[in-house]
Amino acid sequence: MKSRDGRYPRQKTQPMNPLPAQPVSHTVTHKGLRLHHVEWGAPGGDALVMLHGIRLHAHCWGHFGRRFAGGYRVLALDARGHGESDWARPEDYHLQDFYEDLHAVLESRNLPPVTLIGHSLGARVAMLYTHLHPQGVARLVLVDMGPGLPAAALNRDFSRVTETPQPQEFGSHEEAVDYLAALLSRAPREMIEESVRHGMRPAGDGKFTWRYDPALGGVPLSHKDKREWDLWQVVETIACPTLLVYGADSRVVTPDIAGKVARIMPDCRVERIENAGHALFTEQPEEFARSVGRFLDETSKAAQAAIR
């Protein structure tokens, strides 16, 4: 029986490919919602907190989490309505709600200042959190998302699973992998397989569907009781070191937008990933990891030099 929160008994299925050691799962309850996140690496290291985009999930950061687990503590959140976190009421998928969830998770884990790394919707949440809690964020990484969209992208949905009219149900995980592989033809197939493995749930009659609330569709709705933020004004206040990394083929971040972000943010650098679009961390995972790694190294050295 399908429940409103979208959770089903965990399936006993064999992975398509063997994976390294899995991350540790944690849950936090906030306003009655069970919020799930996973963690790679040993406690005690600098924390990198990963925020996914719309209709994705924590495990889409698996490649990155394993890559950085040796030197960092990597936490990846399932936003409300996604992955193993509970579903909310349709009117409660507002930027303010996602921000409050992030605040609740970070408070519960009692972390020192973190590095926030957000893709798409996750980047918007990260901007707002950093604006409201500057003392809690050491560094910020915006992944193919600026404070605003180009005119051609307004009121459009660039979620990777809605770039073409998509089937909602599949006869097998492999069928879903083939579907996404056709959309993300530049991505390593093993990354798509991992994302599908964690990103699907039973739909009945032996079929599978995406592991997110169907209410998460299109442009987020405004709400009379929740503040609407001008993120261009928000980022002007963000003083921590920031990296905007975007795909050369992105329709979400254009060179004009990237240039404007670099001009108005006090400490922002921009890098472009070639042969990649909005899903750049899936399409070019090694280039993405190297870009973020350089940023982490450079800012760590600068902070150490400032102390001396």
Image (cartoon, rainbow, N blue to C red):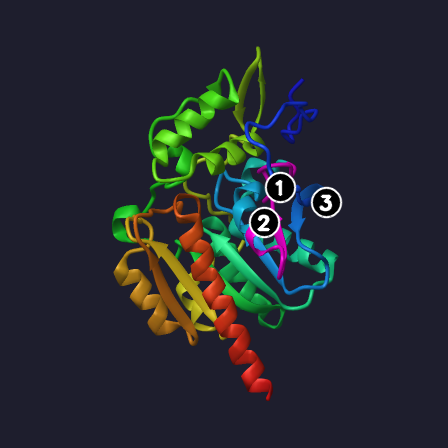
Tell me, yes or no, whether the highlighted magenta stretch contains residue 124: no
Most foreground residue, 3 or 187: 187
Describe the element under mark 3 as helix, strand or loop: strand
Is 67 above or below relative to 174?
below
The answer to which of marks 1 and 2 sits earlier in the sequence is 1
- Give the extent of the magenta segment: 67-86
The answer to which of marks 1 and 3 sits earlier in the sequence is 1
User: Quadrant of the image for the C terminus?
Assistant: bottom right
Q: Is residue 42 left or right of residue 137?
A: right
Residue found at x 39% / y 65%:
232
User: Quadrant of the image for the N terminus?
Assistant: top right
* Res 240 seen here: no
* Res 12 seen here: yes
Residue found at x 28% / y 56%:
254
Quick check: marks 1 and 2 in contact, CB under 8 Å? Answer: yes
How far separated are the C-alphas under marks 3 and 2? 20 Å
The quadrant holding residue 74 is: bottom right
The quadrant holding residue 132 is: bottom right
Q: Which residue is mark 1?
A: 20
Describe the element under mark 1 as helix, strand or loop: loop
Q: Which residue is mark 3?
A: 27
Number of other residues with Cα within 10 Å of mark 1, as a class: few under 14, some 14 to 19, many 20 or more = few
Q: Please, what is the three-letter code of the amino acid marked with disc 2?
A: Arg
Q: Which mark is residue 66?
A: 2
